[in-house]
Amino acid sequence: MIRRINADQRERGAKQMSSGTVCVQCAVAVDAAYTYLVPDGLSLSAGDIVVVPLGPRKVLGCVWNEDPGEVSASKLRAVEGLVDVPPLRKNLMDFVDWVSRYTLSERGMVLKMVLRSSDVLAAEKPVTGVSWAGLVPERMTPGRERVMEKLGEQAVWPKSALADVAGVSAAVVDGLVSAGVLEKVDLNLRPVIEQPDADHAINDLSEAQRAAADKLAETVRDQSFAVTLLDGVTGSGKTEVYFEAIAETLKAGKQALVLLPEIALTQDLLQRFARRFGAAPGEWHSGVSGRARARVWQGVARGEVQVVCGARSALFLPFADLGMIVVDEEHDPAFKQEDRATYHARDMAVKRGHIGGFPVILSSATPSVESRANADAGRYGRISLPERFGGAAMPDIDLLDMRQDAPESGRFLAPRLVEAISKACEAGQQSLVFLNRRGYAPLTLCRRCGFRFECPNCTAWLVEHRFRNKLLCHHCGFEKPVPPACPSCEAPDSLVACGPGVERIAEELVDRFPDQRIAVLSSDLVPGVKAMRTLLAEIARGHADIVIGTQLVAKGHNFPLMSVVGVVDADVALQNADPRAAERTFQILSQVVGRAGRAGNAAHAYIQTYVPENPVLQAIAAGDREAFYERELDVRRKAGMPPFGRLAALIVSARERDLANQYARALKHAAPGADHVDVLGPAEAPIAMIRGRYRVRLLAHSTRAFDLSDWVRQWLSRAPKPTGGLRVQVDIDPVSFL
C-alpha cells in the first residue's frame, strides 16, 4: 500500500520546504542517489521505500543515508508517496553499497534486486472466507447439503472454492451467509508461513554428526561473524547437521536463510525441513507465484517468516533480523549471476554475514577450490564428515578405457556398463546414466557435402532435439525444424547425427531394455518446476528403472534404490581451456557418482573415458579427494590463479566485429599502469558471437591483495565512452570463460 501525496501537497512542498529534501536511490540502472523534496505531511527516514518521479515515469526507490546538499527547491521534484512496508535495515543498505562497489554494478540495479517490483510491495488484497456459525439451515436443499458436508471436511473455505467443490453457485453460499448459517472469516489473518518449531522432531544423529552440529550451534550462539566449511562426502548427512544450526538460530529469535543452486528441484530437502521443524520454510525462486513471493518478501521484512530456502536472489531479501546463512552445494556454478548485476552468491553471502555480524555455513561434498584454500589458511573453519550416515559405503568406481572396452558400432555405452545396468534391473535396483549434453546430438551434418547446421546468431552448432524434431541453439534459443534434405546440396536423407546427447542415450537404452521403465531428466524435456518435482519424486519412489540425465541429476537428489551409475563422455569438460576445467569435472563427476548407494546398498559406478590416466579421474576412481585438492591448489598457486590471485573479465560486444575489436584495443590502451596487475588480450571470446553480437575479451590478472575492483573502475573512467551500440560487461571474479 502506498501513501500517496496529492498535487496540492506537492505544490506546497515545492514552495515551502526548500530545506526538506532527501536523497533517494532509484531502483533503476543509475549509480547515484537523486535529491527530492519532502512534501507536507510526510516524514521520511533512511531506508524508507518511496515512489518518485524519474523523467516521464514513476519508479520505486529508497531513501538513502546521504546528504542531499544545498539545491534550489525550484529545480527539484517531490516524492510521490511512501510505500507501507518496513524500511530497509542499515546493514542491508550497506550490503547494497558494497556489492555495487565490488562488482562495478550500478547501485540502482543492486537495489532493484532488493525491491524486486511494485507487485512485491503492494498490500495484499483482502480475501474473505466462510466457516460454519453453528446453525442449521431452516430449508435444506441438495446444494446446501453438499455445502454443509464440505464444511465438515474443512473448517474454513474461500467462498469461491467452497462453491466449486460443493458443485453449487456462489449464490447458494451467499444465501447461507445471509441466513446466519455461515459467517465470514478474514483469510488474510492466516500466517504467511507456519512458524517452524526448533524442537519439533530432533533428528537421530550419528556421533560424528552430533559433534559437527554442536560446533555449528556454538558459532550461532557466539552471535558474531564466522564462516564454516561443512565438508562431507555425499550421503554423510550434512543437511541434518546444518538443520541443528538453524534450530539454534530460531531459539535465538533470529531468521535463517538457506541458499540452494536449484531450489525449484530440491523438493526432498523441503520435505525433510518440514519433518524436522513441523512446518515448511518460505520458498523464494522463479517457480513461486508473484502473490506468494510478495507474501514471503513482506513476511521476511516484518519478521513473520523465520526461515527461507531460496535461489541466489534470496540473498537480497530484506530480513528483519537475519542470524545465519547456509550456502548448500556452495561449489555449484549456478550461484554465479552473469547478467545485469554480476555477482557470486556464495561470496556475497559471506560479505552479508560479515556486515551483519552473523555466521555463514558453506556446505558441500566437493568444496570449491577457493573455499578449501580459505579453510586451509584458517580464514574459514572446517568441519569434516568423511563417512556416510548409517555406515553406507561409497560406490566402487571403475574407469572404463574406451580404447579397450569400446561400445558396439553405432552404440555409446560400454559393454560392462550395459551388463551392470542389466543386473541392476534384474535385482529390482535403479541405474543412472549421466551425460551433460541435452538433445539428441551436438552436431548434425550432411554425409554427402559436409554441410553443418550453424546458428545464424551465435558461433555455435545447432543441436538436434529429435524428440521435438527441432534444431536448437542453446545460447540464444533459435530453433528450426529438421529439414528432410540437406539445405546445401539438397540430397535427401543425407543428414547424420554426430555424437550422443541424452535423447540418443535414451534411444539406445530403450532398444536394449524395452521392458524397463526409463526416465529422462533434462530441462528441455520436462515442462516446468511442478512437473520436474513430480518426476523426481516418482524416481525416488522407485517408479523408474533407468534414469538418464544431464547435470540436473547432480543436485543433491536422494534415490534410495540407485545402485549403478554410468558416466558417458567423462572427458568432455577436460578438453577445453577453462582454468576451472579440472575442478568442474571433479565436482560434477563426484556428485553424480554419489547418487548411488546412499541407502546402504552395494553400488558401483562406471566412468567411460579415453584418458583414464588423467589425474582428476584417477583421484575420483581412488576416492582420494585430498590428492585432487593438493594438486589443484599447487597448480593454481604456481600460476597465481584464484584463490592465490584475482581475475576480472571485460567483455566488449557490438553488432560489428571490427567495431568490437577496435574498441577493445582502445580499452586496453587506456588501462592504468600498475605493478601488481597484467592485462591479457584483447582476444576473440571462445563463443565469438551470441545473439548477433560479436564478443572480444580482456582479462585483468592481479595478486590476491590488490584492489582489482577499484583499479578496473579507474580503468573504465579513463577509457573512451562506448558509442554506436558498443557494450562493456565487467565480471569481477569470473566463473565462466566462454
Image (cartoon, helix red, strand yellow):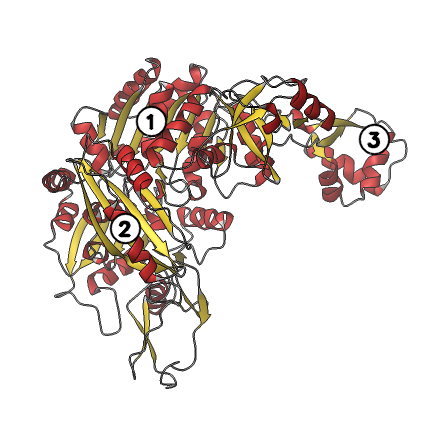
> Disc 3 on helix, strand or loop?
helix
Q: Earlier in the sequence, mark 3 or mark 1?
A: 3
Instruction: Please state if 537 lies on the left or on the right of 60 as rendered.
Output: left
> Disc 2 on helix, strand or loop?
helix
Mark 2 residue type:
Ala
- For disc 1, the neighbor class at 10 Å (few under 14, some 14 to 19, many from 20) is some
Q: How many marks?
A: 3
> Disc 1 on helix, strand or loop?
helix
Quadrant where the N terminus sits is top right
Q: Nearer the viewer, residue 658 or 292?
A: 658
> Which residue does the numbered mark 1 point to in the structure image?
351
Instruction: Please state if 681 lies on the left or on the right of 612 as rendered.
Output: right
- For disc 3, the neighbor class at 10 Å (few under 14, some 14 to 19, many from 20) is some
> Which residue does the numbered mark 3 point to in the structure image?
177
Q: Earlier in the sequence, mark 1 or mark 2?
A: 1
Q: Earlier in the sequence, mark 2 or mark 3?
A: 3
Q: Could you say where residue 353 lies in the image, as x and y percent from the top left?
A: 35, 23
Q: Could you say where residue 289 lies in the image, as x and y percent from the top left?
A: 56, 41
Mark 3 residue type:
Val
Within the image, what quadrant is residue 2 found in? top right
Q: Residue at point 19% right, 57% down?
A: 575
> Which residue does the numbered mark 2 point to in the structure image?
666
Q: Could you say where residue 533 lies in the image, as x and y percent from the top left?
A: 46, 46
Instruction: Please state if 67 lies on the left or on the right of 159 as rendered.
Output: left
